[in-house]
Amino acid sequence: MKALRYVLSGKPGREGVLPLAAWELPELLEAAGAGEEARSAFEAGPVMLQTGGWQSWTAGWELAPGETLPARVRLIPALRKMSAPPWDCGRNGNAPAASGKGEAAGSFIMYLRAGDWYLALAEEPDEALRGPLCFFISPDRRHIRAGLYCPGLEGGGAAGIRIFLVRGYFALKDALGDLYRQGDRFAALAWLGKRPGGYESWYNHYTHINEDLLLRDLDGLGRTGNLIKLRYLDRGEPAVFQIDDGWEKAVGEWEADPLRFPRGLKPLAERIEEAGLIPGLWLAPFLVTRKCGIFRNRPHWLLREQDGSPVKAGWNPHWDGTFYCLDLSRGDVLEYLGALMEEVTGRWGFRYIKLDFLYTAFFYGRFASGGTPADHYHRALAVLESRSKTPSGLPAAFLGCGLPLGPSFRHFPLSRIGTDTRETWDWPLARFLRHTGRPSALLSLKDTIGRSFLNRTLFINDPDVIFLRSRRCALTGTEKECIALVNYVLAGQIMFSDNPLFLDGEDLALTGRISALYDRLEGDEYGALPLEGRGGKPSGAYRLISRSGKTGGIINLGDRPWTPPEPLPAGGAWLLDRRIPGSGSFAPRSVSIMVWD
Ligand code: 9PG
C-alpha cells in the first residue's frame, strides 16, 4: 500500500479544487506494486470504475468504460445539487464544473476494477480532514487527477492518498476495513442490536403524518404478522419507530406542527418507549425554506453568494421548491443547532436521529468567519453530537442521510448509502429530467450493490426501506422479494414503512417467506459483481457471492430475462429459483440464490 502525502499550499482554483496530483494508469499500477498478471488484466479490460460517490444520493454504482453520468438535469437545474458534488454544480446546479469534458467525478474512495483486480485510491484517514478528496477520471480510465475541495483555504494542513491493489471483492473490503478501522467503529451502536431496523413513516405517509396516524401504526406493529414483529419484537430485539418528515412547522422551523401534533412530540416519544421501541425523528438541521421563521426573521443566518442571494441547496416538491442552507461558520447558528438537539433528544427523548441533507454544508458562499466548508461541517457536527443524551440518560444514535461520505464516516457509522427507494421500480418523470439521485427502487438497488464494499467496513449501510405491502405499491412480488433480499445481504439495516394494519394475506405470506430466507442467509457476508452483457456492456445482472463460498446466485435488475453464458457451479441446491420455467434465463427484476453445502 503506497501512502502519498501532500502539504497544502496555494489557493484552490476553479470551483474550489486544489490540484494534488495527476497520473497515468500504468504509474498507479506501478505505485501499487502490480505484477504482470494485474497489469495485463488492466491492459485487456474492460476497466470498471467505482467513483465512490460524493454523498448518499450520488450514483454509487460501477461505471462501464466510457460511461458518465449526465452533466445536466433538465428543467430544474437545482435538482442536480442533490446528487452532483459541489465542485461540479456551479451556482445553479448545471455547470460550470471542475471536471473536464467526459471526465467522471469521484470522491473519497474510488477504484478501477479489471476482472477481480481492484486498484483503489482512498483518502488517508489520519490526515486532518480539510477535504473532501476529489478524483477526475478520463473516459478511457487511463488519466486520473486528484484534488482537494477546499474553497476558502488559507493554506496549511495536509492531505493524503493511499493507493493499493488487491485481488477479490472480500480482499478489498478487508483492506478498507483495516485502513479505516479506529477501534471497533460500530461498538457505540451495539445497543441497536445485530441489525438495526424498525419502522419509519416516510413511505407509508410521506409528509401527511399526525399523532393519531402514527399511534395507529405503532399499535399495529404489535398486532399483525409484519416483518418488524417477526424479526424484532417477537425476538426481543431492539426496534426503531422513526417519525420522518412532516412533523415540523416548516423545514427549518423545527417545532411540532400544532395542527398535526397539538400535544407536541414528547408524549409521542414516550408512547413509543412504552411500547418497547426506540423513538426516532427526522431532521434536516442545516436547511431553511422560504416558509420558515429564520428565512424572514434571521436572513443573516443564510449562506449567501458573493452577490448576496441565498445559496441554493436543492429543490424538493414536498416543500416549497428551492431550499437553502445556513451559514455554519456563525457562532449563533451553532448555538441554534445545539439548542435544537437539546430539545429533540434532551427534552423530547428521541434517541435515533436521522440527520438529513448533510451535503448542503459543503456549498461555498460568503462565510461570516471565513474558512472552508469542511472546517465548519466538523464543528457543526461536534455541536450536534454533543447533545445526545435523553432525559433518562440514554444515548442517542444518529443515522446520516444525504451525507457526504468522506467527511462523515467518523461521525456517522450508521448511514444511508444510496438514493431513496420508491414504491415503483423507477420514476419515469425524474428519469426524463436526468436526475440520477431520484427516488427509484432500481437506482436504490444499484447503489446498495455498488456501495456494498463499504458495508461493515466504513458504515453500517442503510439501503432505505423494503416493501412487503400490496396496497399503494406498484412493485410486483418478485420485485419486492428482490429488494428485500438484496438489502438484507448487501447492507446493514432493515427499515420497513408499510402500514402494518393494511397487510393482506398475500403480504403476510410474503413476509413469512422473506423472514425465513433471512434466517437461512444470516451469518455469512455477501457481495455482488456486475456481469457483462453483449459487447462488454453492463447486462443489468450481477453475480451474488459470499465469503464462505457456500452461497451464490444471480441478481437481475434488467427489464429482460438474463441468460448466463455459463451455468452456476454444479452441486448446489436452489434456495430461491427465479429462472423462467423451461428456460435457463433469470427473470427480470429478480434474485435467485443457490447454496452449496
Ligand atoms: C424526507 C425524505 C426522507 C428520505 C430522505 C430524503 O433528490 N430527490 O429528489 C430527493 C427527494 C427526497 C429525498 C431525497 C432526495 O428524501 O432520503 O428518506 O427522509 O428526505 O423529506
Image (cartoon, rainbow, N blue to C red):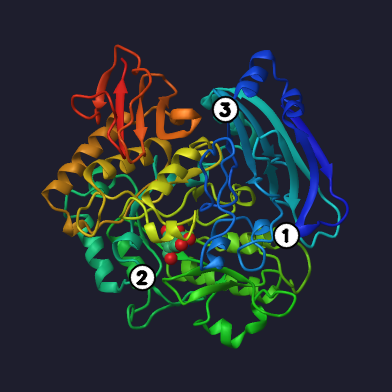
Q: Secondary structure at mark 2?
A: loop
Mark 3 neighbour class, 10 Å CA radius: few under 14, some 14 to 19, many 20 or more:
some
Q: Is residue 95 left or right of residue 471?
A: right
Beta carbon of the mark 2 residue lies under 8 A of ligand 1: yes
For residue 570, above or below residue 70: above
Percent from the top left, x then y, of residue 145?
A: 74, 42
Task: State the residue at coordinates (38%, 41%).
Answer: 487
Residue 383 is situated, as x and y percent measured from the top left of the image, at 62, 64
Q: Which residue is mark 3?
A: 46
Task: Report the amino acid beneath label 1.
Answer: Asp
Residue 512 quadrant = top left
Instruction: Return the x and y of residue 359 as percentages of the image width and height.
Output: 59, 59
Question: Which is nearer the eye, 93 or 228?
Answer: 93
Residue tagged 1: 375
Query: If you read the primary sequence from the N terminus, does the residue marked by circle 2 or circle 1 appear first?
Result: 2
Tell me the quadrant of the picture where the C terminus can be found: top left
Identity of the residue furthest to the top in this view: 571
- Which comes sooner in the sequence, label 2 or label 3? 3
Badge 2 crowding class, 10 Å Cα cut-off, few under 14, some 14 to 19, many 20 or more, is: some
Cα distance in 3D space between marks 2 and 1: 33 Å
Name the residue at the front extreme: 535
Q: Is residue 239 visible?
A: no
Q: CA distance from mark 2 to mark 3?
A: 45 Å
Residue hosting label 2: 207
Whether label 2 touches label 3, CB < 8 Å: no
